[in-house]
Amino acid sequence: MVTNETEFARAQAVIPGGVNSPVRAYRSVGGTPRFLVSARGPYVTDVEGREYIDLVCSWGPALLGHAHPEVVAAVQDAATRGLSFGATTPGEAELAELLRERTTVLGTRLFDRVRLVSTGTEATMTAVRLARAATARDLIIKFAGHYHGHSDGLLAESGSGVATLGLPGSAGVPADVAALTIVLPYNDLAAVEATFAAHPGRIAAIIAEAAGANAGVLVPADGFNQALSDLAHREGALLILDEVLTGFRVGPAGWWGLEAERAGGALWTPDLVTFGKIVGGGLPLAAVAGRGDIMELLAPQGPVYQAGTLSGNPLAVAAGLATLRAADAGVYARIDHSAARLAGAVEDAFAAEGSPVRVSRAGSLFSLAFRDGAVRDYDDAKDQDVWRYGAFFMSMLAQGISLPPSVFEAWFLSAAHTDVELDRIVAALPAAVRAAAVSDPRPEPAG
């Protein structure tokens, strides 16, 4: 009989840890990972035939819901013409044009040029390389708890799986490489000012998630992103805005677009911006974009080398185009409404139990932390009763709700989640809250 346990044992025999991305291993929540075989709308199904309401949504890409008919049809149509050509296709420019069009807000364009790559890690790695080439400087500022992929220079205090597994960074990163990245507390402009003063003329760029979503949700303080832009430019450095998670997820033009709309116009623009997740509609695709003069440094136009055999893969491009074209104002309104309702229900359920929790929300992304105070930075995110999440997670899973298997990850909703699914999620919360409240941080006695 095929079960999640048998599949996990099989995988562990041939794959390190039994998974191809660490958080999937359930190390921080306990139990056996669910091996999924299908998904449709707001539901996923495991090898045992059990169906779950999905609040992972492929870590963001399933904006419309799983297996959306228009996206599936676009991929199937593209596949009939070939899976990969190793050559440029018309769809690549079509997607690039659509990305630029969607990120033009109140007359201000977010970027001039864009290059398609296959992963968010590739996008941020390329952005850093471009920034160093453009400024002829080496040092990079990043923020604790912000995750920008697993390239060597960006893993220190990264959040996401690094936080989930309790790691400070990664083995195998040379000290000389790590020393080129300066890690600062998030939402602390004074620390950024002091760092520029301590390293005059040496800092190439600041890289920041547009809104933090990898140490739980970390919301930028009002005006923080604009201040980063102003500081960087004053010091001859660049700002790289990482919208791999937030881009086209929290709104039609990502977090930058939300800030621009709230201000009545774009008061600032980053020099470089990275996208992922939704731009590929669930298939491997990401992008680095930015000012024309910086982007033109990329080969073959300039001296900065970047390449990828599957960059701009025609199936991924087709999925991205179909997803973005279907993601209209109604889609974002539905997801925002669902997120507001569910985040409020989580708060209410914990309040009813008298158990401390803080829900942080950035657009439709939200997360919970088992603490009383606000979560402003990575230190706050780590200062919580992390162990309670495992009990909460397993209770929800037993009731047919699939949450991110880490307290340091955001929850995702899709336009396919209706009141039927939300009602079921809300109904499952009281038992999960009680399980978290009585959970024990001590290990069980041996023997």
Image: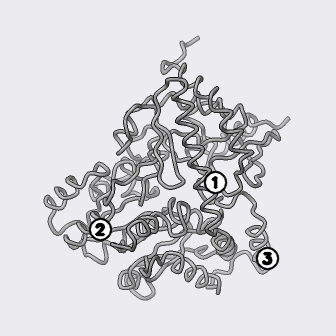
Name the mark nearer the viewer: 2 or 3: 2
Residue for badge 2: 229
- Indicate which disc, 2 or 1, sits on the residue closer to the N terminus: 1
Q: Which callout, 3 or 1, points at the residue further toward the start of the chain?
A: 1
Check disc 1 and report the residue beneath it. Answer: 58
Q: Residue at x 33, y 62 (%)?
A: 225
Q: Position of residue 103 (x, y in %)?
A: 49, 75
Colour scheme in use = one colour
Distance (Cα) linking label 2 and label 3: 42 Å
Q: How dense is the environment of label 3, judged by Cα within 10 Å: few (below 14), some, or many (20 and up)?
A: few
Q: Amino acid at mark 3?
A: Asp
Q: x, y (%) of residue 241? A: 39, 65
**Which mark, residue 77?**
3
Task: Judge the density around disc 2: few (<14), some (14-19), many (≥20) Cα neighbours within 10 Å.
Answer: many
- Which is nearer the eye, 196 or 85? 196
For the residues labelled 2 and 1, the Cα–Cα distance comes to: 31 Å
Tell me the SS state at disc 1: helix
